[in-house]
Image (tube, helix red, strand yellow):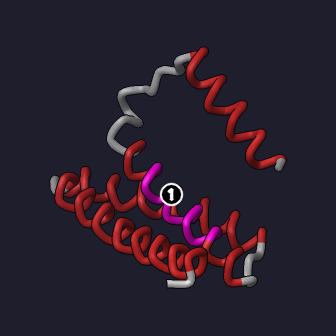
Amino acid sequence: MIAVLGLVVGVVAGLFVRPEVPAVVEPYLPIAVVAALDAVFGGLRAMLDGIFDDKVFVVSFLSNVVVAALIVFLGDKLGVGAQLSTGVVVVLGIRIFSNAAAIRRHVFRA
């Protein structure tokens, strides 16, 4: 319940405050969001499977975001930022859909 309350407070605060993202960070933000969603869906799947560990979730969440941002940063430095960004989104997208399918099978028993 605390997590849901925190989410609601964060969304409402974001809507009212309208934070501005620095131009330097803009290329990394979408990738970080997709990486964070991958960790959230993985955590939800682990919770439904009865193997959720909060330490593993926090480490997974932070490491997904950092590694994805570093890959995109490296791609920018090498001049292939768009290609590596696409690769990161595809890989994390596959993981998100795989976790979503497992969650659906668990919830609907199908």
Whether residue 11 is situated above or below residue 75 in the rendered picture = above
Left of 68 or right of it: where is 60?
A: right
Location of residue 34 (image quadrant): bottom left
Q: Estimate the x, y position of residue 99 in percent, counting from the top left.
A: 49, 75
Q: How many marks?
A: 1
Q: Estimate the x, y position of residue 23 in percent, counting from the top left.
A: 36, 27
Whether residue 94 is situated above or below residue 6 in the rendered picture = below
Q: Say few, some or many: other residues with alpha carbon within 10 Å of mark 1 (under 14 / 14 to 19 / 20 or more).
A: some
Identity, as a three-letter code, of the amino acid under mark 1: Leu
Location of residue 41 (image quadrant): bottom right
Left of 70 or right of it: where is 55?
A: right
Magenta span: predominant SS is: helix
Which stretch did the figure color magenta?
A: 33-44
Label 1 sits on residue: 37
Give the secondary structure at mark 1: helix
Q: Estimate the x, y position of residue 42 in percent, counting from the top left.
A: 57, 71
